[in-house]
């Protein structure tokens, strides 16, 4: 049996290993990655699935973005499930958990770049993404959205851009000060 919980700091390294296994280095070249770079996931909207032995079996995160000027939304991805747990509905359970969490937190819409045949069962489609574009190359027919609140993407147009908190990075002075304390 698997358990889906909020991601913790201890999950970051196993999560990266899972993404490497499932998606490979190509994941770093995607336009969606440009929206995630240097950002932290949306608060309380990063989930992991643990297998019966407690190890990471799946992951999904939501990220704060704008769907054009003044139009807040979330970006879903990446979604990954360990090969041992694929074809048992874990990916679908992770997506539903993420969407339920986003809805409960009051978010209005979620956007992703993915396979329409897979994501349409969750309400995703291209109907509201025609006037939006991603930073960098992407397949237009794979730009999908679902509204969690009716009308959240009405009139959305323009560049999809990152929002939300940035990853905390120490300055050079802080790094040097820490090194000097260690060597003293």
Image (tube, rainbow, N blue to C red):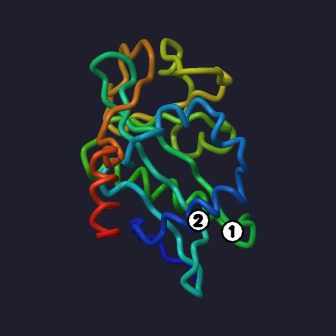
Residue 19 % position (x, y): 64, 56
Circles 2 and 1: CB distance less than 8 Å?
no
Where does the image place residue 121, in percent across and percent down from the top left? 58, 45
10 is higher (above) or lower (below) than 102: below
Q: Quadrant of the C terminus?
A: bottom left
Q: Is residue 86 above or below residue 41?
A: below
- Dot 1 falls on a residue whose secondary structure is loop
Seen in the picture, residue 158 relative to 23 is either above or below; the reply is: above
Q: Position of residue 108 (x, y in %)?
A: 31, 36
Q: Nearer the viewer, residue 44 or 125?
A: 44
Of the numbered discs in the image, which one, if any, rests on residue 141? Answer: none
Which residue sits at x=39%, y=68%?
8
Front-most of 6 and 165? 165
Residue identified by numbered label 1:
88
Secondary structure beneath disc 2? strand
Mark in front: 2 vs 1: 2
Does 51 sit above or below residue 167?
below
Marker disc for residue 58: 2
- Outermost residue, front side: 184
């Amino acid at each position: 049996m698997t358990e889906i919980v909020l991601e913790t700091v201890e999950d970051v390294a196993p999560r990266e290993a899972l993404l490497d296994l499932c998606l490979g280095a190509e994941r770093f070249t995607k336009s969606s990655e440009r929206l995630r770079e240097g950002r932290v996931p949306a608060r309380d909207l990063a989930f992991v699935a643990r297998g019966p032995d407690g190890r990471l079996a799946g992951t999904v995160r939501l990220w704060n973005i704008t769907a054009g000027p003044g139009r807040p939304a979330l970006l879903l991805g990446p979604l990954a499930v360990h090969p041992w747990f694929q074809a048992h509905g874990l990916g679908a359970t992770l997506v539903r958990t993420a969407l339920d969490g986003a809805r409960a937190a009051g978010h209005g819409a979620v956007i992703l770049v993915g396979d329409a045949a897979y994501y349409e069962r969750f309400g995703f489609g291209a109907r509201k993404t025609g006037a939006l574009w991603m930073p960098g190359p992407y397949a237009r027919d794979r730009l999908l959205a679902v509204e969690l609140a009716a009308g959240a993407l009405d009139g959305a147009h323009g560049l999809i851009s990152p929002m939300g908190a940035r990853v905390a990075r120490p300055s050079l002075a802080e790094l040097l000060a820490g090194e000097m304390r260690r060597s003293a």
